[in-house]
Amino acid sequence: EIVLTQSPATLSVSPGDRATLSCRASQGVGSNLAWYQQKPGQAPRLLIYDASTRATGIPARFSGSGSGTEFTLTISSLQSEDFAVYYCQQFSNWPLTFGRGTKVEIK
Amino acid sequence: EVQLVQSGAEVKRPGATVKISCKASGYTFIDYYIHWVQQAPGKGLEWVGLVDPEDTDPIYAENFQGRVTITADTSTDTAYMELSSLSSADTAVYFCAAGERQAVPDYWGQGTLVTVSS
C-alpha cells in the first residue's frame, strides 16, 4: 500500500501567518491526492482534491500543490478557525490511505 | 443539503459483532459512493472500505477483509457497516462518508463510537 508521510507532525503558527504543510508519498500518485481538516470532536472536512482543486465552500486562503510524490497544503493567512489537524489522502491505488496528520497549533 | 446521520454509540464484548447505520439525505442515494473510515482514540484516519449503492461488490481494505461487511439499502437510503470478531483494537470512532467521485469522500457523518470491552 502507498504510505503517506506528513511533516511536520506539529506546526506552531501565529494568527495571520502562513502555514506550509507537506505530504510525501512512498510512490507516485499523480495528482490523486486530497487534504482534509479535522477539529477536535468533529468529522474530517474535505478541503482540496486532485492535489490543487478546492472543495465547495473552501476559502481561497487554502491552496494545494504538487504531483507525483511531493505535495503541499498552504494556508496563506491563518485564522483562528484554522487551528486543527490536517490529513492528506491518496486515491491513486487501493487501499485508500491517509497520512498521520499535521497538527497546526497557535504559537 | 447533503446529510449523513449515523446510529448511536455501541459497547460490545470481545468476539461480538457490531452493525452501524448511516442514513443519507439531501441527494440521490445511488449517485454517491459510501465510505467507512476508522479513527482510534487519539489516532489518525484509516480507510475501512466503500460501497457503490448501485453495485453489489464493495471494496475493503486488507486490514479489515474477512471481518467487515458494507452494504447499502436503496429502499431506505441507508448504508451499513458490520464488523465481526471484535477486539479492543477495534475501539474507535467509525465515520461514514459520501462522495460523487469513487475515492474522494466529500461529506461525512458525525461518527459512531464503538467501545470493545470485557
Image: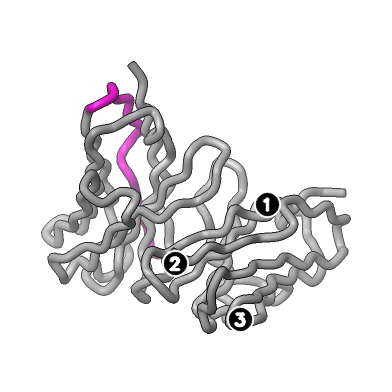
Q: How packed is label 1: few (under 14 Cα within 10 Å), some, or many (20 or more)? A: some
In what element is the residue under mark 1? loop
Is B92 colored magenta in this rendering?
no
Alpha carbon separation for disc pair 3 and 1: 20 Å
* First of labels 3, 1 by sequence position: 3
The percent coordinates of residue B99 (x first, y second) are 37, 69
Residue under numbered circle 3: A52
Question: In this orientation, which residue lies closer to the viewer: B64 or B81?
Answer: B64
In what element is the residue under mark 3? loop
Residues tagged 1 and 2 counted as in contact (Cβ below 8 A):
no
Chain letter of the residue carrying label 3: A
Q: Image height check: is A52 above or below B1? A: below
Q: Image height check: is A34 above or below B62? A: below
Residue under numbered circle 2: B106
Seen at 72% across and 65% down, the residue is A21
Q: Which residues are magenta?
A: B1-15
Residue under numbered circle 1: A84
Q: Is residue B7 left or right of residue A107?
A: left
Q: Residue A101 falls in which quadrant of the image?
A: bottom right
Seen at 20% across and 50% down, the residue is B69
Can marks 1 and 2 be said to lie on one chain? no
Q: Residue B74 falls in which quadrant of the image?
A: bottom left
Label 3 is placed on what type of residue? Ser
Q: Is residue B85 left or right of residue A36?
A: left
Seen at 22% across and 53% down, the residue is B70
Q: How packed is label 3: few (under 14 Cα within 10 Å), some, or many (20 or more)? A: many
The percent coordinates of residue B28 (x first, y second) are 25, 70
Q: Is residue B21 left or right of residue A91?
A: left
Q: Image height check: is B47 above or below B103? A: above
Q: Residue B59 falls in which quadrant of the image?
A: bottom left
Label 2 is placed on what type of residue? Asp
Residues tagged 3 and 2 counted as in contact (Cβ below 8 A):
no
